[in-house]
Amino acid sequence: MFSISTIKHLFILGTAVTASVIAAESAIAVSTFGINNDVKKFTATDNEDTLISDGVAVVSNGNTNVYIGTNQVNNNNQDPILTSFTNGTRDWVFTDIETTGADARGIALLWDGNNDLYAAFTTDGTQGDASNDFRRFTTNGWLNSYGQGGGAKATVLLKIELDRINSSDPNNITGVINNGTFVSALLSNGKTNTLVPTNMSFSGTELVLEAQSFFAPRNTDAERMTQTTSGISSPFDYTITFNDSLTQANSAISPGWDNTPVSAAVPFEFKSSLGLLLSLITWGIVTKKE
């Protein structure tokens, strides 16, 4: 039997453990997602009330809100814009993520509530020097450039490290973005085709992008998938998962398309029981040689 003092001690200990668990759980960041379902325009001087009334995509943590959208630079050009407010006061604004003649827009944000903010953009190509566009951030990305062609909308994902923002020069993007990738569809002639983001989420440490892909969705090796279902047409639902640094695609799925990686595909067609047996034997030998 436990003594009264022992029971009291266990109760207090249990309360302390419970409090510790609650505290630990409250410290876990809750991700937030925001997306512009149409073009949302604002400038570097617009106040937060204007962005709120215009329905600009936002993610929040505590009293801090981060917004993404499009800056109409002139009649013929659009650039992405990203800004943060805390208690209504602007913390920083980035207007130089992409400043070339290509049309680029800010589409969506995903925030882990701590230091990592992922942003999704679209662009219809690349023009001029890479130091003025997304390419300076995507050197090590899964896809490091827009690719061939122009006019089709490719998605660009960037990982923004909020703890790298310099408080003495908060609007300077240098060093704040160190990881990024292009994400696009691929035509049979090798040119880039349209892929538009519809959602982002976290799966553990991985980033999951959901999108509408036109012909043809890409596999994890960046090559075109093979269509397996007839009677379906663009756009196609597409989900691709990246590592946290956006250098590698870990999975890619599009209903109606073959998403088996080329390296894992069985290179034999089984047409009979004899063919099955011979193919299995051959496959085993080839595998052993590798």
Image (cartoon, grey):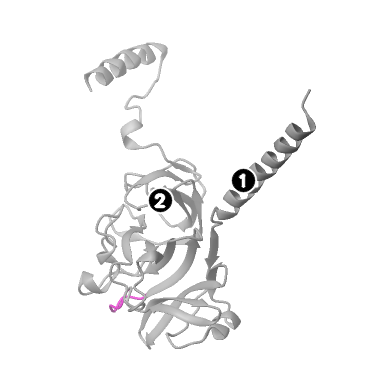
Q: Relative to 134, say whether 42 is above or below.
A: below
Which of the two residues, 109 or 10, is positioned nearer the viewer here? 10
Report whether residue 154 is seen.
Answer: no
User: Which amino acid is tagged 2?
Assistant: Pro
Q: Quadrant of residue 98?
A: bottom left
Q: Relative to 29, say whether 70 is above or below.
A: below
Tell which circle, 2 or 1, labels the residue nearer the N-terminal end.
Answer: 1
Please state if 53 lies on the left or on the right of 160 as rendered: right
Q: Which residues are magenta?
A: 98-103
Q: Quadrant of residue 263?
A: top left
User: To which residue does mark 2 refer?
Assistant: 217
Which of the two residues, 281 or 200, is positioned nearer the viewer here? 200
Q: Measuring 64% from the left and 42% from the top, which residue is drawn there?
A: 17
Please state if 39 lies on the left or on the right of 178 as rendered: right
Helix, strand, or loop for circle 1? Answer: helix
The spot of residue 133 in percent (x, y) is 28, 71
Which of the two residues, 275 or 84, is positioned nearer the viewer here? 84
For the residues marked 2 and 1, what is the alpha-carbon distance in whole angstroms? 44 Å
User: To which residue does mark 1 refer?
Assistant: 21
